[in-house]
Image (tube, rainbow, N blue to C red):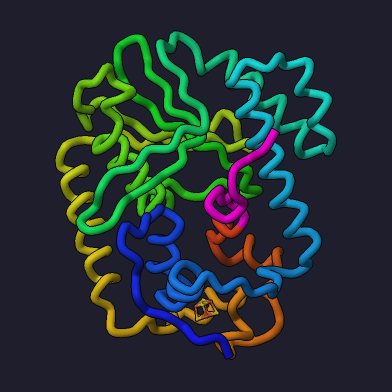
Amino acid sequence: MTELTSKIPAQFAFSQSSLQDYADCPRRFHLRYLNKLLYPAAESEPALENERRQQEGQSFHRLAQQYLLGIPADKLERLANSPNLQRWWENFYSFRQKSLTGLTGLYPEITLSAPLGDFRLVAKYDLIAITEDEKIVIYDWKTYRKRPRDEWLSTRWQTRVYRALLVAAGAQLNGGRPVDPERCEMVYWFANYPDDVARFPYDGAQYKRDWDALVKLTEEIRTAASYPLTEDRQMCAYCTYRSYCDRGIQAGDLDVIEAEMEAEALFDVNFEQIGEIEF
Ligand code: SF4
């Protein structure tokens, strides 16, 4: 059995994924981020279907990024080589023409980071756009099959971290001026539901609440005496560490995930884990 460490390295960079993992299961955070334990169990069955969806999600993000960087649409549409990708690409192309207009700044795949207590907070954004009236809008592309509820999205660490970090570290995008939380907004765009975006405006009170919560949570993680296994065993059915944790061998069923859980986040494109997209 691998010897595990519980020590958080100096300058550890927290992200929305690592914080969400800690919130979902402290042991998962411990195994994945402190010990970098790679465990090959499939997250869900059928494993090939899961893998295909992950790959399609990554390919879509690559197409969107390249298009926003200025590569002509006719060169990219040939790369949309599956029915899902074709549909997502067409939806995204229309969305770009209709809704991403009148912008004075467009920053696809940008990374921001800021100190957070003894640590750092980092996030890689699909797109940050500056509007003519000087609003700063965070866009995140989701290829979920099911449109999650706004209430669920609003509690995700992604929604909280992305907006808070934009305020803390976004001055470079705002002509060097501090970012006013009231002028920030986060928008989730769903490739399968292109006209049904989820919008999350922001304000100073929310920013203070989020930043205080981030400081408190990272301090809790730093001083944790242990990283217990989650009591919500449903989490384990879709976790790669379940045989390591003795929480079962059989992967959860994809159809059950969709029917019972708002666990589409399993299929999020996680840039921290797949590394940089290469062209
Ligand atoms: S299998 Fe369960 S207890 Fe173990 S890391 Fe995953 S979610 Fe946590």
- 182 left or right, relative to 34: left
Residue segment shown in magenta:
267-279
Figure check: 169 above or below 101? below
Q: Report the residue at 84% width, 34% height from top.
A: 81
How many marks overall?
0
Query: Within the magenta stretch, is there residue 4?
Result: no
Q: Could you say where residue 246 lies in the image, as x and y percent from the top left? A: 59, 90
Q: Main secondary structure of the magenta part?
A: loop
Q: Could you say where residue 253 lies in the image, as x and y percent from the top left? A: 70, 70
Seen from the viewer's position, the closer of residues 10 and 131 is 10
Q: Report the residue at 25% width, 56% height from top.
A: 214
* Residue that lies at the very extreme toward the front in this rendered image: 10
- 176 left or right, relative to 13: left
Query: Within the magenta stretch, is there residue 276?
Result: yes
In the picture, which quadrant includes the C terminus?
top right
Q: Could you say where residue 46 lies in the image, as x and y percent from the top left? A: 78, 67
Q: Report the residue at 43% width, 27% height from top.
A: 128
- 52 left or right, relative to 22: right
Asked where in the image residue 177 lies, by quadrant, the reply is top left
In the picture, which quadrant includes the N terminus?
bottom right
Q: Report the residue at 40% width, 53% height from top.
A: 15
